[in-house]
Image (spheres, rainbow, N blue to C red):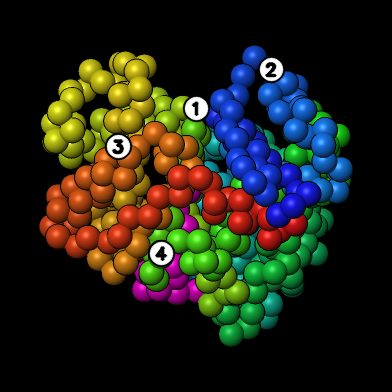
């Protein structure tokens, strides 16, 4: 759109888009984000009013959450769905009844979500929860369980935020309050980070998480791409890999307002998470066969060449498809044989050719799923999906 500037601050790149063009700049990690962005794009940014600049960011990897719930079937399942679709990264989930068996995460958790029970139940949580929380390093905590348990938890947990139950009395999901809280928490988190909050010097609009923006774009992408439902979108970045998928691809569908849901694999990136990606690859029994197929050896992991980056990106595609298949049980398994289109966006589209992507996806289907299924591959070479999302958000 005319007179609007869109900026994405990623873990590896800046993207800056006007109505006429889009630029991509590799970040200088020796500089603060604002200083680096201003150095590379300051002349362009100075042409726009603050109210006409729209920014999203995944530079800090997004917020992390730990979820404590009662069952996988309802409380944990619903809370995970809301967190993922709010752009939040889940580091772990805990079944409350077994909480004493869980280890304490070593890193600080941005937000703890406690959930469980419909409003007609009470006395679900007790001392074992409080003991665990006393040992946990976290910044925020929210309760979205039975309203009858809220007073007791408020009495025993400092700074607890109480929101309406995300499970109604018919065991349906109620998502809006928690989703709004998590989205706003991301905003507050950014304002508390010196290197990000300085971006408010150039915008007067709310800064959203990039995955949130991308997810909101999916119902609109058929205007720009030849995409056929059901489809998945794979966004491979420097720190994480995000998957957005049509809800038709899951058996146990949660009835929400979203047409598409999100998964995130926090340790599958090709720059900041490179070592974790390589570790995951070495622990996949098909990796060495794939490397042979690509005519390289495991020594490619020790290189820093353009070819090595391409191999890592191809591996990331293969590994994330594995994680969503029956081969590796994760949060959810998708009906990959029902997919009509696979859309790829992010830095990967600037490095891999269409043929290189198609080769990996074909290898996955034949080797893991024993199938010749051939979904169409759609490459978002010019970041049109992100541009569409941030433009419509503004």
Q: From this viewpoint, is residue 374 visible? A: yes
Write down the region rendered in magenta.
242-254
Residue topped by disc 2: 31
Q: Which residue is mark 1?
A: 272
Can residue 186 be seen here? The reply is no
225 within the magenta span: no
Mark 4: few, some, or many residues within 10 Å (few <14, many ≥20)?
few
Tell me if mark 1 has few (under 14), some (14-19) or many (20+) residues whose alpha carbon lies within 10 angstroms of its own: some
User: Mark 4 = which residue?
Assistant: 226
Select label 2 or label 1 by which is in front: 2
Q: Earlier in the sequence, mark 2 or mark 4?
A: 2
The image shows residue 385, relative to residue 77, as above or below, that is above
Q: Secondary structure at mark 3?
A: helix
Between marks 3 and 1, how big is the CA–CA gap? Answer: 16 Å
Disc with the residue nearer the chain's start (4 vs 1): 4
The Cα–Cα distance between marks 2 and 3, rounded to whole angstroms, is 30 Å
Is residue 183 toward the left or the right of residue 292 in the image? right
Q: Residues within 10 Å of mark 3 (few under 14, many from 20)?
A: many
């Amino acid at each position: 759109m005319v007179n609007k500037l869109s900026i994405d601050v990623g873990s590896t790149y800046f993207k800056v888009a006007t109505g006429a063009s889009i630029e991509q700049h590799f970040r200088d990690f020796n500089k603060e984000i604002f200083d680096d962005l201003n150095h590379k794009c300051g002349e362009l940014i100075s042409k726009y009013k603050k109210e006409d600049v729209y920014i999203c960011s995944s530079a800090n990897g997004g917020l992390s959450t730990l979820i404590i719930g009662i069952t996988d079937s309802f409380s944990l399942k619903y809370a995970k769905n809301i967190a993922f679709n709010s752009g939040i990264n889940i580091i772990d989930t805990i079944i409350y009844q077994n909480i004493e068996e869980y280890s304490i995460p070593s890193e600080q958790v941005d937000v703890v979500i406690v959930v469980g029970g419909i409003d007609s139940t009470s006395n679900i949580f007790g001392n074992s929860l409080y003991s665990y929380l006393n040992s946990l390093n976290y910044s925020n905590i929210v309760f979205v369980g039975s309203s009858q348990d809220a007073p007791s938890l408020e009495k025993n947990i400092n700074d607890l935020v109480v929101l309406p139950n995300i499970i109604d009395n018919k065991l349906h999901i109620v998502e809006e309050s928690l989703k709004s809280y998590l989205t706003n928490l991301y905003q507050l988190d950014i304002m508390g980070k010196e290197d990000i909050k300085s971006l408010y010097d150039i915008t007067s609009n709310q800064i959203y998480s990039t995955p949130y923006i991308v997810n909101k774009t999916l119902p609109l992408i058929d205007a720009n791409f030849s995409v056929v439902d059901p489809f998945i979108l794979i966004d491979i970045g420097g720190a994480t890999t995000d998957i957005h998928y049509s809800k038709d691809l899951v058996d146990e569908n949660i009835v929400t307002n979203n047409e598409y849901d999100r998964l995130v694999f926090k340790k599958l990136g090709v720059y900041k998470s490179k070592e974790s990606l390589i570790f995951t690859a070495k622990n996949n029994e098909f990796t060495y066969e794939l490397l042979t197929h690509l005519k390289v050896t495991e020594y490619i992991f020790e290189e820093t060449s353009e070819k090595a980056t391409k191999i890592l990106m191809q591996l990331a595609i293969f590994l994330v498809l594995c994680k969503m298949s029956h081969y590796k049980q994760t949060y959810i398994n998708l009906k990959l044989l029902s997919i009509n289109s696979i859309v790829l966006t992010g830095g990967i589209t600037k490095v891999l050719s269409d043929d290189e992507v198609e080769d990996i996806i074909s290898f996955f289907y034949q080797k893991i799923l024993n199938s010749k299924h051939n979904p169409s591959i759609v490459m978002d070479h010019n970041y049109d999906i992100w541009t569409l999302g941030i433009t419509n958000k503004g």
